[in-house]
Image (tube, rainbow, N blue to C red):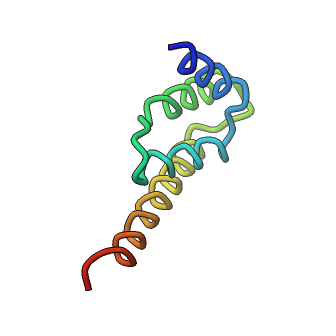
């Protein structure tokens, strides 16, 4: 449980658009990682601070999800049956 708390602390301290994109790519790939760990804190930070924009949070989360889905697609295409 300590590692989850440390991860949440790190995410809140270092949260930016690239972190949102990377974690969403991880979530959408084959690694089971919940998007709830990064998207709600990013939305909260965007609502309470001027350094992040909620529309850009949604955009970068979508880009990350698409990157993760493409990783899965090409892995399945490469490793799948002919």
Q: Residue visible at 44% across and 67% down? A: 70
In x, y percent, where is residue 26? Answer: 50, 48
Res. 50 image quadrant = top right
Q: Residue visible at 50% across and 46% down? A: 24
Say above or below: 5 vs 15.
Answer: above
The residue sitting at the left extreme is 81
Which of these two is toward me, 41 or 22? 22
The residue sitting at the bottom extreme is 82
Which of these two is toward me, 77 or 69? 77
Res. 23 image quadrant = top right
Relative side of 69 to 3, left or right = left
Say above or below: 81 vs 34.
Answer: below
Q: Residue visible at 57% across and 20% down? A: 3
Relative side of 22 to 77, left or right = right
- In the rendered image, which quarter contains the C terminus? bottom left
In x, y percent, where is residue 38? Answer: 53, 32
In x, y percent, where is residue 29? Answer: 43, 54
Say above or below: 9 vs 62.
Answer: above
Relative side of 42 to 15, left or right = left
Q: How many marks?
A: 0
In x, y percent, where is residue 20? Answer: 59, 42
Res. 33 image quadrant = top left
Q: Residue visible at 35% across and 77% down? A: 77
Say above or below: 55 vs 6.
Answer: below
């Amino acid at each position: 449980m300590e590692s989850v708390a440390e991860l949440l602390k790190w995410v809140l301290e270092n949260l930016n658009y690239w972190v949102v994109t990377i974690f969403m790519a991880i979530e959408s790939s084959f690694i089971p990682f919940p998007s709830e760990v990064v998207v709600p804190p990013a939305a909260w930070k965007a609502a309470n601070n001027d350094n992040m924009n909620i529309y850009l949070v949604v955009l970068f989360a979508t880009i990350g999800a698409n990157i993760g889905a493409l990783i899965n697609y090409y892995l399945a295409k490469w490793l799948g049956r002919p």
